[in-house]
Image (spheres, grey):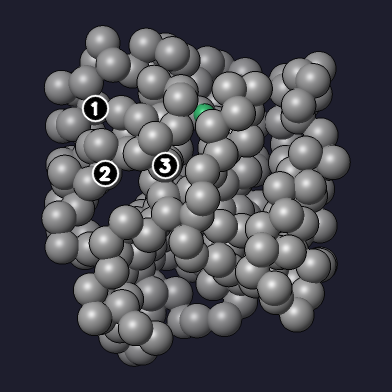
Amino acid sequence: MIHSSFEFDQEQGLNIFAVGAHCDDIEIGCGATLLKLFATYPIGKVKWIVFASNPQRRLEAIASAEQFLSEVQDKEIVVLDYRDAFLEQKKFEIKEQFEFYKKDFNPDLVFTHYRHDRHQDHRLLSDLAWNTFRNHCVLEYEIPKYDGDLGIPNLFVEIPEEVADRKVQILLDCFASQAGKHWFDRETFLALMRIRGMEAASHGRYAEAFHARKIVF
Ligand SMILES: [Zn+2]
């Protein structure tokens, strides 16, 4: 392990802060990595914060987060109700939310959106994560979309096939409201993990990939 900030107290367990603009972002971007971390390391606390939702999507997000976090004892799932696509207009409020949820919490890993994601809500949360967590290991996850903004990630997490399947199955089971979207299907989710697995030249077929902007030895 080369990142000093990632060294964590084994007795306290790994503390994780995961942030997503929309209800399924954390799952799509780093769901399999989280499942793998939960199965690999002792876990301290996980804070899972989603900013935009509506009443239906909120219920879906909670059901999905509960499944991803089913093995985690100490967890906080927060699904706020900001309006999708309009987070920029609430930037100052959202910054205060970050500060509120950061209080008394020193995560070993922060998962957020990719800084150069073309979705304005995603970019905002990436910026706010970085300016809130200034001495932390921040990993930026990727969300495939029609904008074609996937970059060249530099950190890969090998994902066992059964973990990749579990991630996709929870997504498909929990987010019924997204089923009609042309991109929201098993093939999209597996394809991206398969490509990242190929790039990682991993032993298995799948990986999730991240932008690790700053590494501290
Ligand atoms: Zn999103």
Query: Where residue 108 appears, x then y in whole percent?
Result: 30, 69
Helix, strand or loop status at disc 3 = loop
Q: Give the class, few, some or many, for how many residues have Cα within 10 Å of label 3's Cα (few <14, many ≥20).
A: many
Q: Earlier in the sequence, mark 3 or mark 2?
A: 3
Helix, strand or loop status at disc 2 = helix
Cα gap from disc 1 to disc 2, whole angstroms: 10 Å
Residue 34 falls left or right of residue 195:
left
Residue 9 vertical position relative to residue 149 in the rendered view, above or below? below
Q: Give the class, few, some or many, for how many residues have Cα within 10 Å of label 1's Cα (few <14, many ≥20).
A: some
Q: Is mark 3 within 8 Å of ligand 1?
A: no
Query: Where residue 196 appears, x then y in whole percent?
Result: 66, 58
Helix, strand or loop status at disc 1 = helix
Type of the residue with mark 2: Ala
Q: Which of 159 and 215 is in front in this view?
A: 215
Q: Which of marks 1 and 3 is nearer the N terminus?
A: 1
Type of the residue with mark 3: Tyr
Disc nearest the viewer among 1 and 3 = 3
Query: Where residue 68 appears, x then y in whole percent?
Result: 62, 55
Residue 50 appears in the figure: no
Query: Where residue 95 appears, x then y in whole percent?
Result: 18, 31
Residue occupied by mark 3: 114
Q: Give the class, few, some or many, for how many residues have Cα within 10 Å of label 2's Cα (few <14, many ≥20).
A: many
Which residue is located at x 44 percent, y 32 percent? Answer: 117
Which residue is located at x 61 percent, y 58 percent? Answer: 208
So how many labels did they put on this image?
A: 3
Residue 59 vertical position relative to residue 63 in the rendered view, above or below? above
Type of the residue with mark 1: Ile
Which residue is located at x 36 percent, y 30 percent? Answer: 123
Numbered mark located on residue 129 in the image: 2
